[in-house]
Image (cartoon, rainbow, N blue to C red):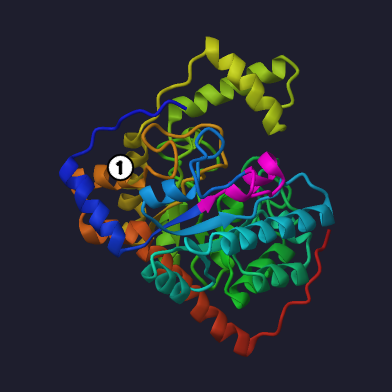
Amino acid sequence: MERTAVTTSPTSLHHVTRLLREHPLIDGHNDLPWAVRLLTDYDFDRADISGDTSGRTHTDLPRLAAGLVGGQFWSVFVPSDLPGGHAVTATLEQIDCVLAMVQRYSDHLALATTAEDVEHIFATGRIASLMGAEGGHSIDCSMGALRMLYALGVRYMTLTHNNNTPWADSATDEPVNHGLSAFGEEVVREMNRLGMLVDLSHVSDDTMRDALRVTQAPVIFSHSSARAICSAPRNVPDDVLETLATNGGVCMAIFAPDFVSQDYWEWRLTAIDAARSAGVETADFDTFNRFLATWATAHPRPVVTIEHVVTHLEHMREVAGIDHLGIGGDYDGCDMLTRGLEDVSGYPRLFAALADRGWSDGDLAKLAGRNVLRVLRDAEATARDLRQRREPSLARCEV
């Protein structure tokens, strides 16, 4: 992708660089492990992120350093159409990838499972590496599997990906449970007992509202933005943002153009219709992206810039409040990125743009990671309390 310069004040850029060296920037969602699987079947000799991997991935260690990233939730994503136990196995392979990556690059990365870990690792000059499972299909309706993911270090689970689970509806599938089933509510309670963050990116509006009703701990949206600005169903409606503030949770703004720009979202819907008319299977990401690459030559993509992301963040701050915002770029999880945020080196440009709009140092520190650390601590405290009063769940899925 051609890099496009974004005009920000040099003074602001220098200022936020100093600020992000003092306050950890914690990104909520990066799909590098899946990208490495697709590129090299987890072979870091052939996908060595210690050097520049531009053109292959959005993420490598030099660009993470340039982006002043202090903490990263690595997604242990697997496709949501994998059947049953195959999804669990693939998720374990993804976890193995993150653990191997952290061990191989231990001068730059270290595994974190608590807020205290994140702060300690950041103080050593390394990137605190956390894990998040992207979709409830990764536990195959098993509370035991959920507990084992936690034991292996996974600290959030997105309740669905693009397809429903038997117990929760996705934003991009036909509703079945109209939110959470009784088992789905029990999954949320068990995540609270464990101290695993409930992630509501990708889920339907009804699932969002059900989870917020049931949870006893703050929730997150690991990579979502504001529905009022871009109508993509993956984004968060204002009433849910308001409830999120009451819950104490955090919505981590995404950089993928589909969810940032209304024009881009409408362009993508038109492309989907064209692909279906041509007999292309749009649910197959690789096939659909190949179609898009050709189709876009005659139908240029709308331009999406940092200013679009700023608009989302300012709307979310107005509705939910500054204490409930974070960053979740979705690097290596989408085919295109916003101009100026093309890879993980771009975060300082976004923070400089916000500083130019009058955001205070306190606001920027909260957005960068202070809010996420608070949510982690709250989830840990809730779990300590619940474990004294509640045994591990033995619930079985009703389906």
- Tell me where residue 35 sits by quadrant: top right
Q: Would you say 225 lies left or right of 171 here?
A: left
Q: Would you say 229 lies left or right of 98 here?
A: left
Residue that appears at 56% across and 80% down:
383
Q: Is residue 103 above or below residue 175?
A: below
The location of residue 219, given as percent across then percent down, is 51, 63
Give neighbour class at mark 1: few <14, some 14-19, many 20+ (Cα, 10 Å): many
Q: Residue 33: within the magenta? A: yes
The location of residue 326, given as percent across then percent down, is 40, 55
User: What span is colored magenta in the figure?
Assistant: 29-46
- Residue located farthest toward the top when viewing the structure as drawn: 298
The location of residue 150, given as percent across then percent down, is 65, 71
- Tell me where residue 123 sits by quadrant: bottom left
Secondary structure under the numbered disc 1 in the rendered image: helix
Regarding residue 316, the answer to whether it shows in the image is: yes
Query: On the image, numbered disc 1 is attached to which residue?
Result: 349
Q: Residue 127: within the magenta? A: no
Q: Is residue 17 above or below residue 333?
A: below
Q: Amino acid at mark 1?
A: Arg
Name the foreground residue: 55 vs 372.
Answer: 55
- Residue located farthest toward the bottom when viewing the structure as drawn: 388
Q: Is residue 350 above or below residue 19?
A: above
**Quarter the C terminus occupies:** bottom right
- Tell me where residue 182 sits by quadrant: bottom right
Residue that appears at 79% across and 57% down:
89
The location of residue 185, given as percent across then percent down, is 67, 66
Q: Would you say 248 lies left or right of 288 here?
A: left
Regarding residue 156, the answer to whether it shows in the image is: no
The mark tally for this picture is: 1
